Amino acid sequence: MKGEHLVLVADVGATYLRLALARNGMLLAPASRFERERFPDFEAACSEYLHEAAQGLRLDGAAVAAAGRLD
């Protein structure tokens, strides 16, 4: 549908990574939680999640929140 946007939403914490898909600002399903130590990097975690969740859909973008200090 024209005007709809599918985005990956990520919350990166010290211990867990939460990933979800959203369309037009609404989550499509509850976020999936992964232990960060299971993955060598953020890209590997996203790849695993998207393989299952996106099922070939094209993403328009991503919104990522990461815990940490701002200077």
Image: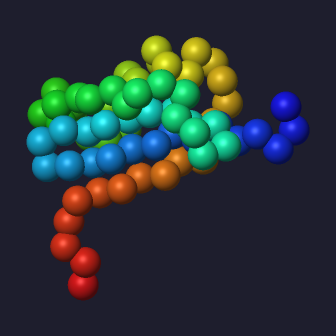
Say how many tags the image has. Answer: 0
Task: Tell me if 18 is positioned left or right of 26 in this view.
Answer: left
Residue 62 x, y percent position in the rendering: 53, 48
Task: Tell me if 63 is positioned left or right of 4 in this view.
Answer: left
Whether residue 71 is visible, yes or no, is yes
Where, by quadrant of the figure, is residue 16 drawn?
top left
- At horizontal 52% and vertical 35% (from top left) the residue drawn is 27
Q: Is residue 26 above or below residue 69?
A: above
Task: Tell me if 34 is positioned left or right of 5 in this view.
Answer: left
Residue 21 x, y percent position in the rendering: 52, 33
Q: Residue furthest right?
A: 2
Residue situated in front as seen by the camera: 56 or 67: 67
Q: Is residue 51 above or below residue 2?
A: above
- At horizontal 85% and vertical 31% (from top left) the residue drawn is 1
Residue 11 x, y percent position in the rendering: 33, 47
Where, by quadrant of the figure, is residue 15 drawn?
top left
Residue 18 x, y percent position in the rendering: 31, 37
- At horizontal 14% and vertical 49% (from top left) the residue drawn is 14
Image quadrant where one finds the C terminus: bottom left
Whether residue 50 is visible, yes or no, is no
Where, by quadrant of the figure, is residue 28 drawn?
top right
Name the image colouring. rainbow
